[in-house]
Image (spheres, grey):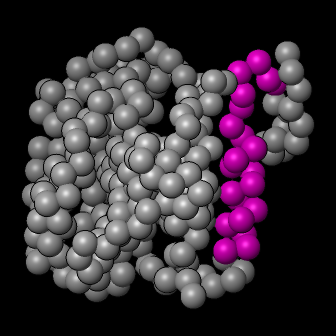
Amino acid sequence: MAIECKHVYSLGSTCRCTDYLKMAGLRLTSGPFDWIGHGDSVQKVLKWCMTDFSGFFEKDDLVRMSEACGPRRTYWYINKATGFVTAHDFVYGRPFDEMYEEVKARFDRRIKRFTDALKGNERVVLCWLARDVPFKLDPFNLEETVAAFLALRAKYGDHIDLLCFLRDPSADPAAPRVETPVEGLRIVSFFTAGYSQDDLRIDRDEEKAVLAELARYRAPGGKLSNRWMSIRKWIWRSKISRKGNQTFRFMGIPVWRRKV
């Protein structure tokens, strides 16, 4: 039986976690950790949720770390105070000062939605994916993670659940290992053979394990909503281009791909 949840948010460690929520039809609103990358462990991210995000995105802390890149031609900025990297918000060709005000307003809206959900009484599921590309993650510490999660629940309530996905070479390739050290905390350890040679964003073992676990949850809207989400999942999944391929679209929807 599917677990009904009102809010599902990504905690990182890269935007790929948000991608999986979209593919599973569980991302109904955006959150502050959706499109950032970081080298922090999950307990450090949970501690940010305890501080009301004070100093989370200050202008003087942002340092550009790359030239414009990616399909949207965006600059990567690293936050000296937090270590977080934003890769999709600052668009090439626009002044930083002008863009900062827009991006800051966007983060403020996401933070408010996120904290309002934490302070409410409807089920909130927080998802964290230990993905070390292109960042080096701190080692996963079970004791510290449990302590940080219990502190978060003590502040906001037992309506908050945490779902952690860990890459573990010792896991059974046929079935991920699932642990529940405390109520509300679920840790899924899965085997992976690595990333696709054509696209470092794609790890088939990871995708299979994460989406299988996320299938246990259902967002508001019932069967009709989830059928629509499955269509959106297919459309979104087909958008991912492969190296050496050209994608043709009809009214924005990918319909055919060929080698070039």
Residue depicted at 36% across the width and 81% down the height:
123
Q: Quick one: 244 or 111, which is closer to the camera? A: 244
Residue depicted at 75% across the width and 62% down the height:
231
Residue depicted at 57% across the width and 88% down the height:
1
| 207 on left or right of 35 | right
Q: Provide residue 127's location: percent of width, then percent of height.
A: 38, 60
Q: Provide residue 81's location: percent of width, then percent of height.
A: 12, 33
Q: Provide residue 248's location: percent of width, then percent of height.
A: 86, 32
Give the position of the C terminus as an image quadrant: top right
Which SS type dominates the magenta stretch?
Answer: helix
Q: Is residue 213 visible?
A: yes
Q: Provide residue 225's location: percent of width, then percent of height.
A: 66, 76
93 up-or-down from 217: above or below: above
Q: Quick one: 213 or 96, which is closer to the camera? A: 213
Residue depicted at 40% across the width and 40% down the height:
131
Magenta-colored span: 226-246
47 up-or-down from 250: above or below: below
